[in-house]
Image (cartoon, grey):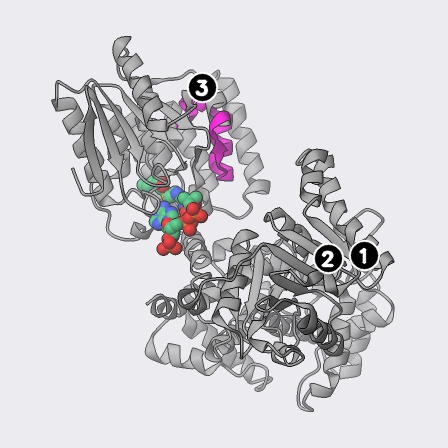
Amino acid sequence: MSDQVTLTRDGDIAIVTVNNPPVNALGVAVREGLVAAMEEVDSDAAIKAAIIIGDGRTFPAGADIREFGQAPQPPALFEVCSRIEDTTKPVIAAIHGTALGGGLEISLGAHYRIADQKGRIGLPEVLIGVMPGAGGTIRLPRIAGIAAALDIMISGRQVGAKEAADMGVVDRIAEGDLLEAAKAFARELIDEGKGPRKTSERSEGLGTPEENAAAFETARNGIVKKAKGLYAPARMVDSMEFSLSHSLQEASEYERDCFMECLKTPQQKGLVHAFFAERASAKVPENGRADPRPLEKIGVIGGGTMGAGITVAALNAGLRVTMVERDAESIEKGQQNVEKVYDRDIEKGRKTPEQKAAIMARYTPSTSYEDLGDADLIIEAVFENMDVKKEVFGILDKVAKPGAVLASNTSYLNIDEIASATSRPQDVIGLHFFSPANIMKLLEIVIPSNAADDAVATGFALAKAMKKVPVRAGLCDGFIGNRILGKYATSAAYMVEDGASPYQIDKALLEFGYPMGIHAMGDLAGLDIGWANRKNNAAKRANDDRYNGTIADRICEKGWFGQKTGKGWYVYEKGDRRGKPNPEIETIIAEARSSLGITPRDFSDEEIIRRYLAAMINEGAKVLEEGIALKPSDIDVTFLYGYGFPRYRGGPMKYADMYGLENVLADLREFEKEDPKFWKPAQLLVDLVEKGETFDDLNKRAAG
Ligand code: 3H9
């Protein structure tokens, strides 16, 4: 056996326990241990049946992702699954937690499966750019059916015990203790003389050849929509189809080849990076130095879109929320904004009216700041204006209890200055939510100069309770996300002035993998936001800065603010949220170019992407250089979760590593010739290229 797999006995039943915390990943020692355990089960005549179970929080949750890209070490996972299947005595997989990927494949190697009520199964390989490589495409369809197996693999979704039982994947659901129920199952099998039942030899899930062919056809068509741009799903379908007409050995070799092809793709590297980056983002020094303060009651100031979204996120996290607005009419509106979300949930069948009522029982509307006296954390989501925010924080200083964390949802403003309106700057942090705040997973936690570690840790605890992905950001104009957005949006504005069409830029971005282009995004968010920012910042702009708003200002001057006014870069007919290019934009652009004395030139899609990404990566490097982000992967997480950066590209900094930092620098040097100020390469980038290092080296250093 190995340290990570033990075999104990209860009479004639062998209990094989996997113990490789935290998720019992199937690293080499676990694989060796499972094979050794099956040898013992076979060779010991006193053993009549075996149970495979995970210690701690879960049945194995998959192959050890950290082994990807390293030289493969035997035994391969497929061989382990087959060794389990070949065992001459019945083997039961007892599933709790999440039997995912290779974990589910191990359980499919077993002859029977029992799960506890909260147990879940799934093949989430697609989410990290690979596909099942240990028999999943071969064994699952034989019991679950082709359509269900394809759905599970292509979506990567987790399936609860009940649904898994309905599909025929799980034979039983344990009512009480899982191990006891598994033992009782084993006893029954022994008493009834039921031997091994090989999944690879079953076929009850399969339909007629015509039905199967139709399921493959549907899946292939669906991939285009559901898994746009991903490489792995098509290979899963190929592998499953192949397995129907080939021997287990041939099918496993084919599956292995498809898996290895996925493993070689940049998509796999991007997606695995995203997986670990997301988990690394909550590892910040403050969390190591301090525990969070108690968090039970939240105050939210403002009942507009943002305030209501934050309120819903907090209510959904099980917190009590008091929302404060300035008068009866506004608080009424605020409450409606909150209720609207739950009413839509009821309409869609996601919640019952009783569930809504139970949630709303934790909500208190108020027009008095005094009602925030017992709140543990108060989030201000009022108008983005320094004087207004300072006034609010001055009041909070008077009404909040000692030790309450006071948070601003500002997207740009200096939180040190906001904190100066209080006598307790150690309690003030920034919590920058993204709209709609009940849906968007990103939460920038902004650390002003005097914030106490436990106030920051409380921000992270709130993110965890709300199931958000937190990113630690230092103080600067726009923090991590909006500051970098400012640069690449400017690069796009310059390209339009210089000759690119906004629609060509959007198309190039869609092809790169964005869900929408930057101009369509501007229309969605409201073009008036950028317009107001440009006006506010007019005084700060240096004389030699090339202005980026010549065209956008002209659009706003016409009262076209995007979707909400029915017109912006695109025209939106009633009820249409997609929009068609606005024919009048061409004239506006032509006039602007002529007023600027620009002779337009052509841009290729490739150049558009090079400029857009170079602007993004270069500012990302500056953000790192200044310590605004602690590590490159935090920038990646920000853009994956807040700005639609395609996940399979890993985030801008991971993309930069894969594109080659020397190539990013070469692009910047080329663009620098036309505008030395805007395109000046970040010193950090220059240094990394000189040393032959990557952003990932900085991630590794940050992880210690
Ligand atoms: C596969 O199986 C391929 C096979 O078909 C074929 C092979 C030939 N490996 O997420 P958490 C770490 S592909 C290594 O915070 P939760 C994770 O990084 C695999 N490490 O907990 C974190 O580390 P740290 C298919 C892993 O409770 C810690 O465990 N399986 C792995 O919120 C806790 O994780 C998957 O893709 C792993 N497989 O969620 C499942 N999984 O503490 C991926 C986790 O240092 N995993 N870690 O930050 C998950 O979806 C979630 O981790 C899970 C638990 C739902 C299991």
Residue 205 location, quadrant: top left
Between 516 and 152, the one nearer to me in the picture:
152
Residue that mark 3 sits on = 205
Q: Are marks 1 and 3 in contact (CB under 8 Å)?
A: no
Q: Position of 134 compared to 277: left or right?
A: left
CA separation in Å, label 1 and label 3 = 55 Å
What kind of element bears circle 3?
A: loop
Crowd around label 3: few <14 · some 14–19 · many ≥20 (10 Å): some
Q: Which mark is residue 331?
A: 1
At which x and y percent is residue 111? 31, 21
Say if the magenta span includes residue 80: no
Task: Mark 1 or mark 3: name the one nearer the start of the chain.
Answer: 3
Q: Position of 406 compared to 177: left or right?
A: right
Residue 633 location, quadrant: bottom left
Residue that mark 2 sits on = 323
In percent of the image, x 69 and y 60: which residue is there? Answer: 300
Residue type of the residue flagged with mark 1: Ile
What kind of element bears circle 1?
A: helix
In percent of the image, x 68 and y 84: which residue is there? Answer: 546
**Mark toward the viewer: 3 or 2:** 2
Task: Mark 2 or mark 1: name the one nearer the start of the chain.
Answer: 2
Span shown in magenta: 140-162
Q: Position of 359 compared to 101: left or right?
A: right
Between 338 and 158, the one nearer to me in the picture:
338
At which x and y percent is residue 304? 76, 59
Residue type of the residue flagged with mark 2: Met
Q: On screen, 345 above or below 201?
A: below
At which x and y percent is residue 176? 41, 25
Say if the magenta span includes residue 158: yes
Q: On screen, 505 above or below 129?
A: below
Quadrant of the snapshot with the N terminus: top left
Between 702 and 504, the one nearer to me in the picture:
702
